[in-house]
Image (cartoon, rainbow, N blue to C red):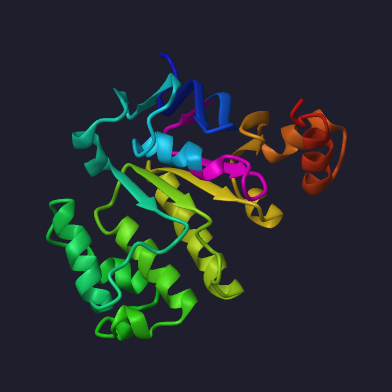
C-alpha cells in the first residue's frame, strides 16, 4: 500500500514583485507526522504555509491537502491554522472568540477542552485586549484547535509563551500526532526543530534539505542542528 500523505507540495513557485518567496518547493508530509519548517525570518516559511492553506495562489506548481487540490473551501473545515500574528477579535472575551471560530467550522463543542489545554479556562471571560502577549498566543492556538482539525498549521506557535507551557504544548502536539493529526510547525528555534519528526530547511524560498533531525545533521556533516543549517544555508545563497 502506498504511503498516505496529508500534504503534497509540487514545484511551487511564488513571486512578489522581484522577490522569489517560493522557488520551486517540493515536499510531502505524512499523515500523523510533526513536520518542521525551519528557517530565518523571510525564508519563505509563512508563504509556504499560506499556500498550503490556500490563502496564496502559487504562480506555478500545485498543493494537495488531504487528497484534495488547494484552494478548496470545503476542505478548510479539516484544517486548523494558527497565524504568526494572533487573528483574534480584541473586543470579545476569550470564550467568545473560541465560540466564534467553532461556529465558523460548524461545531458546537470543544471550547472548554481547548481552553483547558492552553490553560485559559479560568480566564475565559477576559476580554482579549486585556491579555498579555503570551496569553493571546495561547488563545490563538485554542482557536486553531477547537474543531479538532485533521491538519494543523502552526506559524511560530510558541513565540511569547513561557518555557513550561511550551513543553506542555509540545506534549499535546505529540499526542495529537499519535492520534492521527498531521502538524506542520514553522520555527527558527533549534530546540523546537529537534522535537519534529522530520524537517524541511528553507532559505531564500528554496528547500535546502529535508529529513529527520539526525539525517539533516548527517547531510551537513555536523553533530549540531544549528551548525547544519548554517552550513547548508551557506550553499544556498541566491545568485
| Side of 208 relative to 227 (left or right) | left
Question: Residue 6: horizontal and vertical position, in percent?
Answer: 39, 30
Vertical placement of residue 189 versus 27, above or below: below
Q: Is residue 37 visible in this depiction of the protein?
A: yes
Q: Identify the residue shown where x is 27% and y is 81%.
A: 124
Q: Identify the residue shown where x is 63% and y is 42%.
A: 43
Question: Residue 128: horizontal and vertical position, in percent?
Answer: 32, 78
Asked which quadrant contains residue 150, the reply is top left
Question: Residue 123: horizontal and vertical position, in percent?
Answer: 32, 84
Vertical placement of residue 10 versus 53, above or below: above
Vertical placement of residue 34 versus 62, above or below: below
Q: Which segment is the magenta one?
A: 27-46
Q: Give the position of the C terminus as an image quadrant.
A: top right
Q: Give the position of the N terminus as an image quadrant.
A: top left
Question: Residue 69: horizontal and vertical position, in percent?
Answer: 31, 23
Asked which quadrant contains residue 102, the reply is bottom left
Q: Identify the residue shown where x is 28% and y is 67%.
A: 113
Vertical placement of residue 144 versus 77, above or below: below
The front one of 179 and 40 is 40
Q: Is residue 34 magenta?
A: yes
Q: Identify the residue shown where x is 33% and y is 56%.
A: 144
| Side of 41 relative to 17 (left or right) | right
How many numbered markers are drawn?
0
The front one of 198 and 206 is 206
| Side of 163 relative to 101 (left or right) | right
Q: Is residue 167 magenta?
A: no
Asked which quadrant contains residue 179, the reply is top left
Q: Is residue 33 visible in this depiction of the protein?
A: no
| Side of 66 relative to 188 (left or right) | left
Furthest-front residue in view?
A: 17
Amino acid at each position: 500500500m502506498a504511503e498516505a500523505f496529508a500534504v503534497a507540495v509540487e514545484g511551487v513557485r511564488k513571486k512578489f514583485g522581484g522577490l522569489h518567496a517560493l522557488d520551486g518547493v517540493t515536499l510531502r508530509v505524512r499523515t500523523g507526522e510533526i513536520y518542521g519548517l525551519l528557517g530565518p525570518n523571510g525564508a519563505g516559511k509563512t508563504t509556504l504555509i499560506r499556500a498550503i492553506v490556500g490563502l496564496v495562489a502559487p504562480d506555478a506548481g500545485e498543493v494537495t491537502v488531504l487528497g484534495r487540490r488547494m484552494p478548496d473551501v470545503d476542505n478548510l473545515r479539516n484544517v486548523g491554522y494558527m497565524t504568526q500574528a494572533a487573528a483574534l477579535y480584541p473586543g470579545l472575551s476569550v470564550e467568545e472568540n473560541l465560540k466564534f471560530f467553532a461556529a465558523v467550522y460548524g461545531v458546537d463543542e470543544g471550547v472548554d477542552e481547548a481552553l483547558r489545554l492552553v490553560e485559559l479556562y479560568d480566564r475565559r471571560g477576559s476580554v482579549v485586549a486585556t491579555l498579555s502577549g503570551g496569553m493571546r498566543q495561547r488563545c490563538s492556538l485554542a482557536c486553531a484547535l477547537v474543531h479538532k482539525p485533521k491538519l494543523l498549521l502552526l506559524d511560530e506557535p510558541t513565540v511569547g509563551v513561557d518555557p513550561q507551557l511550551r513543553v506542555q504544548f509540545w506534549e499535546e502536539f505529540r499526542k495529537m500526532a499519535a492520534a492521527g493529526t498531521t502538524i506542520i510547525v514553522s520555527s527558527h528555534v533549534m530546540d523546537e526543530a529537534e522535537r519534529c519528526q522530520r524537517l524541511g530547511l528553507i532559505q531564500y524560498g528554496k528547500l535546502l534539505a529535508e529529513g529527520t533531525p539526525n539525517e539533516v545533521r548527517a547531510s551537513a556533516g555536523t553533530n549540531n542542528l544549528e551548525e547544519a543549517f548554517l552550513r547548508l544555508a551557506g550553499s544556498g545563497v541566491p545568485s
